[in-house]
């Protein structure tokens, strides 16, 4: 029994001698550096108010409905940026305003059952201190859609078709705005002002 106790004591002393007690101090561990943050035009923006004005002679798009589509598209595409877009009275405490102006809107029949919509718009995203973050002038959107045979030849009277074109127009516009931010992050400069 004494041999076992003596052997245990020698083993403990050996562990202490080789390990914690006679080893120098451990090097200090520094935490890894934080990942670099990418600062783009949306830096510091959490809430955007969307305003749409239709100055085209035909006034086919409802300004409020199109503004809501654009706000919905921003909310769908900017979840990583944690940006919320709202229209009208819902927007309070916004950091920026996106103003979109519809300049012209025409529809040209292409093939049987297909129509091509040509919509020209201008847009600008501004911080509330009137700092222009992004803008485009006379952007041309060509959107093709099919419509049901036997439907009215005046495609602007088909609400489902006009709604689909408005949704695609909002997707095109928001994609251009978001890709401008991504290109700035890659190059460090913005070329679309």
Image (cartoon, grey):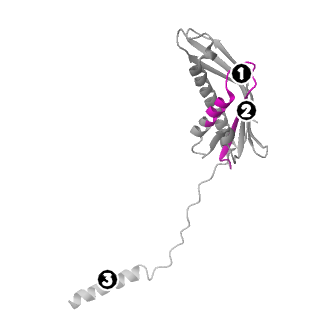
Residue 21 against residue 81 in the figure, above or below: below
Residue 106 against residue 54 in the figure, above or below: above
Q: Nearer the viewer, residue 19 or 121?
A: 121
Q: Nearer the viewer, mark 3 or mark 2?
A: 2
Between discs 1 and 2, the one toward the N terminus: 1
Let me know if residue 52 is in the magenta part.
yes
Q: Quadrant of residue 118?
A: top right
The residue labelled by disc 3 is 11
Across and down, in percent, residue 71 comes to: 63, 36
The residue labelled by disc 1 is 59
- For the record, the magenta segment spans 44-71
Cα gap from disc 3 to disc 1, whole angstroms: 91 Å
- Determine the secondary structure under disc 3: helix
Between discs 3 and 2, the one toward the N terminus: 3
- Per the rendering, the mark at residue 123 is 2
Q: Is residue 32 left or right of residue 124?
A: left
Residue 46 against residue 20 in the figure, above or below: above
Across and down, in percent, residue 90 comes to: 65, 42
């Amino acid at each position: 029994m004494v041999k076992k106790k003596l052997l245990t004591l020698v083993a403990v002393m050996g562990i202490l001698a080789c390990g914690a007690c006679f080893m120098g101090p451990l090097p200090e561990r520094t935490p890894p550096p934080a990942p670099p943050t990418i600062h783009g035009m949306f830096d510091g923006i959490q809430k955007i108010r969307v305003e749409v004005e239709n100055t085209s002679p035909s006034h086919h798009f409802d300004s409020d409905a199109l503004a809501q589509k654009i706000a919905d598209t921003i909310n769908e595409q900017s979840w990583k940026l944690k940006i919320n877009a709202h229209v009208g009275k819902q927007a309070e405490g916004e950091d920026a305003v996106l103003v979109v102006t519809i300049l012209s809107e025409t529809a040209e029949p292409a093939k049987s059952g297909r129509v091509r919509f040509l919509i020209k718009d201008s847009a600008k995203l501004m911080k509330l201190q009137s700092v222009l973050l992004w803008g485009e002038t006379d952007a041309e959107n060509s959107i093709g859609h099919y419509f049901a045979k036997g439907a009215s030849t005046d495609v602007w009277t088909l609400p489902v078709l006009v709604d689909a074109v408005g949704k695609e127009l909002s997707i095109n516009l928001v994609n251009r705005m978001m890709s401008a931010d991504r290109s700035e992050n890659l190059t460090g400069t913005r070329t679309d002002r």
